[in-house]
């Protein structure tokens, strides 16, 4: 039944592509609903009607929306993201370095939170009902139930205000040595790690507990396998699919978390760029940033679904 | 979890435990505050009552003062109105539309179900904060726009949940009997399916309420939610964030208010009697 899995995966990828198109369409139209005429905003109040009309013509603003959408999409496919309204620079140049910064932040967070959350989550499932399990569960419910900015402010209060270990603000440009770098990344990464890990711990714990309640694990218990052997040898290989699924899904929370964390810590990433672009209503910049975020999010949830399909033994 | 240590008590035929009771009391308290806030605030929210800014907690100014020297207690109490009110309106619209569409899709099936599910799944793959950002950029952030945006963001989730439940009920014999009797779609949805899925749907309503409170606070914190002079809890944290280095109560208290509400709702749902919480299938 190998081809069955392949079919499902291809179908899922197809859905992802269609979804991406719908999302791009939605982003484009939401941003073109902006009240006010772009040409007159750009030229300012002193502009003559002729100049506004000329610019409208030059920017193709008189074309039907669907034509503009297709042109924008065509530009995207050729790597042309348009020009920022606010400072007349190509969007690609504005985004480039910022995107690298955000990827660094997301990458470091992933490297720390995945092993941490998996260890805590699997142990919580093994020691289900113990004091440790209850503490981890209550803590992760707590983190999930509060807004990301609260985790961030508490982290600042604890590490920067009371303990004075770390600076509250990041500025990547001032990093001269490794210790500087660690101090700058520490606060944003700690905050994001808390948010992502809490999700991941809950999902991992649920996945392992579900596997532990299956008949073959009970069989392993009855034949006298030790607790660790039961979990590591019998349960974990079968829980791997759901766990990887949980990891991918939790990482998609990075998208929302990064927006808050970059703003609060003034971190020069793409989310901060987008929030600033919303404030100045810089459409091409908003569109491109939104597209990048949606793409990342879609990749992660598609990956999660594909892992779930592949790990289902009934389909293999 | 906490269920093991809390004492059980019987009330109105269901057994509730201590955590659940405390959580409901917190929710009830915030609801009352939201309704009666204008009558119970000690100072008008715009009045500057303290010579100092980011003042500490003291008699008369129980929660200190904010970045302009205004009374924090009054501002938090009034903030409850916006946070609870907007979220409640949004979650009601989201759950009502989502559940009705979900049941309709399950009963009707066919292309209607397929198209709607595909479309709403696509909507679901736009990250919620991003969706909020883009809409705010496009149409601004008045209260009606905020309510509608938050509702639209959470309709797909409510739809998916209700549809999954309704599809199971739809295969039952009593549904076939009702169809053979020639009942209308409205009857099938309202009288056959809804009573069978209402309890898990209500639990889902609570969870979605928490999501919406968090998203609204996040947007307001970014300065893209409620605009001054109105301030919900997220906006209160934003305007007082300058007090963070002094650990001013003005930053901490609104955050704690959000946390007390969302954690209470989560704990209440977690501690509902099994019968209500679980899917009825």
Image: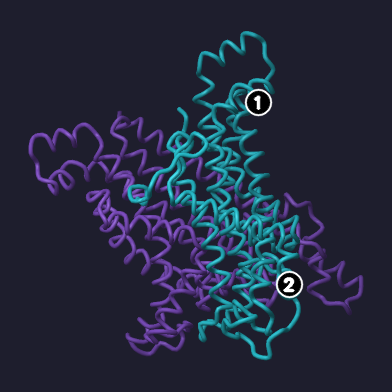
Chain colours: A purple, B cyan
Residue B212 is left or right of residue A104, and the answer is right
At a point 65% along the width and 60% down the height, the residue shown is B83
Label 2 or label 1, whichever comes before in sequence order: 1
Q: Is residue A278 above or below residue B156?
A: below
Chain that bears disc 2? B
All told, the count of numbered labels is: 2
Q: Is residue B181 above or below residue A116?
A: above
Residue highlighted by disc 2:
B228
Can residue B275 be seen here? yes
Percent from the top left, x then y, of residue A303? 40, 48
Residue B197, quarter of picture: top right
Residue A98 is left or right of residue B220, and the answer is left
Can residue A80 be seen here? no
Residue B75's label in the rendered image is: none
At a point 55% along the width and 58% down the height, the residue shown is B261
Residue A175, quarter of picture: bottom left
Q: Are marks 2 and 1 on the same chain?
A: yes
What is the residue that sits farthest to the right in this orientation?
Answer: A49
Q: Neighbour class for label 1 at 10 Å: few (<14), some, many (≥20)?
A: some
Residue B190's label in the rendered image is: 1
Residue B235 is left or right of residue B277, and the answer is right
- Disc 2 vs disc 1: Cβ atoms closer than 8 Å? no
What is the residue that sits farthest to the top in this orientation?
Answer: B180
Query: Which quarter shows the C terminus of chain A?
Result: top left
* Secondary-structure class at tag 1: helix
Percent from the top left, x then y, of residue A255? 49, 61
């Amino acid at each position: 039944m190998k081809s069955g899995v392949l079919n499902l995966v291809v179908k899922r990828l197809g859905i992802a592509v269609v979804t991406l198109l719908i999302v791009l369409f939605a982003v484009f139209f939401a941003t073109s609903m902006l009240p006010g005429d772009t040409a007159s905003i750009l030229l300012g109040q002193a502009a003559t009607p002729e100049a506004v009309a000329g610019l409208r013509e030059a920017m193709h603003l008189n074309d039907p929306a669907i034509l503009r959408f297709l042109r924008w999409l065509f530009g995207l496919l050729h790597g042309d993201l348009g020009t920022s309204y606010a400072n007349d620079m190509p969007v690609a140049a504005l985004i480039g370095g910022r995107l690298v910064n955000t990827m660094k932040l997301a990458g470091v967070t992933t490297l720390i939170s995945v092993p941490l959350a998996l260890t805590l989550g699997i142990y919580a499932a093994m020691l289900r009902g113990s004091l440790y399990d209850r503490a981890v569960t209550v803590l992760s419910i707590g983190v999930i139930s509060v807004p990301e900015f609260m985790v961030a402010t508490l982290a600042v209060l604890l590490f920067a205000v009371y303990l004075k270990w770390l600076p509250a603000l990041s500025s990547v440009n001032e990093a001269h040595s490794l210790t500087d770098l660690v101090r700058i990344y520490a606060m944003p990464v700690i905050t994001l790690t808390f948010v992502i890990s809490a999700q991941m711990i809950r999902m991992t714990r649920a996945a392992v507990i579900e596997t532990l309640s299956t008949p073959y694990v009970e069989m392993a218990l009855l034949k006298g396998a030790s607790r660790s052997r039961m979990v590591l040898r019998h349960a974990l290989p079968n829980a791997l699919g759901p766990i990887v699924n949980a990891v991918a899904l939790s990482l998609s929370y990075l998208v929302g978390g990064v927006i808050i964390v970059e703003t609060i810590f003034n971190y020069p990433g793409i989310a901060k760029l987008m929030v600033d672009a919303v404030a100045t209503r810089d459409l091409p910049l908003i569109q491109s940033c939104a597209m990048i975020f949606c793409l990342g999010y879609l990749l992660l949830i598609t990956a999660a679904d594909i892992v779930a399909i592949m790990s289902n033994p009934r389909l293999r | 979890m906490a269920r093991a240590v809390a004492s059980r008590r019987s009330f109105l035929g269901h057994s509730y435990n201590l955590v659940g009771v405390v959580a409901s009391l917190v929710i009830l308290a915030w609801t009352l505050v939201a309704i009666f806030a204008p009558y119970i605030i000690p100072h008008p929210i715009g009045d500057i009552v303290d010579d100092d800014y980011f003042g500490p907690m003291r008699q008369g100014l129980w929660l200190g003062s904010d970045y302009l020297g205004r009374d924090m207690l009054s501002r938090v109490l009034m903030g409850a109105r916006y946070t609870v009110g907007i979220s409640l309106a949004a979650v009601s619209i989201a759950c009502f539309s989502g559940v009705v569409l979900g049941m309709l899709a399950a009963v009707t099936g066919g292309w209607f179900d397929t198209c709607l599910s595909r479309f709403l799944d696509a909507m679901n793959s736009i990250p919620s904060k991003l969706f909020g950002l883009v809409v705010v950029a496009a149409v601004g952030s008045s209260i009606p726009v905020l309510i509608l945006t938050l509702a639209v963001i959470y309709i797909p989730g409510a739809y998916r949940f209700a549809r999954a439940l309704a599809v199971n009920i739809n295969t039952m014999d009593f549904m076939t009997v009702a169809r053979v009797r020639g009942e209308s779609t409205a009857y099938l949805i309202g009288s056959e399916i809804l009573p069978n899925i209402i309890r898990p749907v209500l639990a889902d309503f609570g969870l979605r309420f928490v999501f919406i409170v968090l998203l609204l606070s996040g947007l307001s914190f970014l300065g893209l939610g409620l605009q001054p002079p109105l301030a919900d809890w997220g906006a209160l944290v934003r305007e007082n964030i300058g007090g963070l280095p002094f650990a001013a109560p003005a930053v901490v208290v609104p955050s704690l208010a959000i946390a007390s509400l969302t954690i209470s709702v989560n704990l209440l749902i977690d501690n509902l009697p099994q019968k209500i919480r679980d899917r009825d299938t």
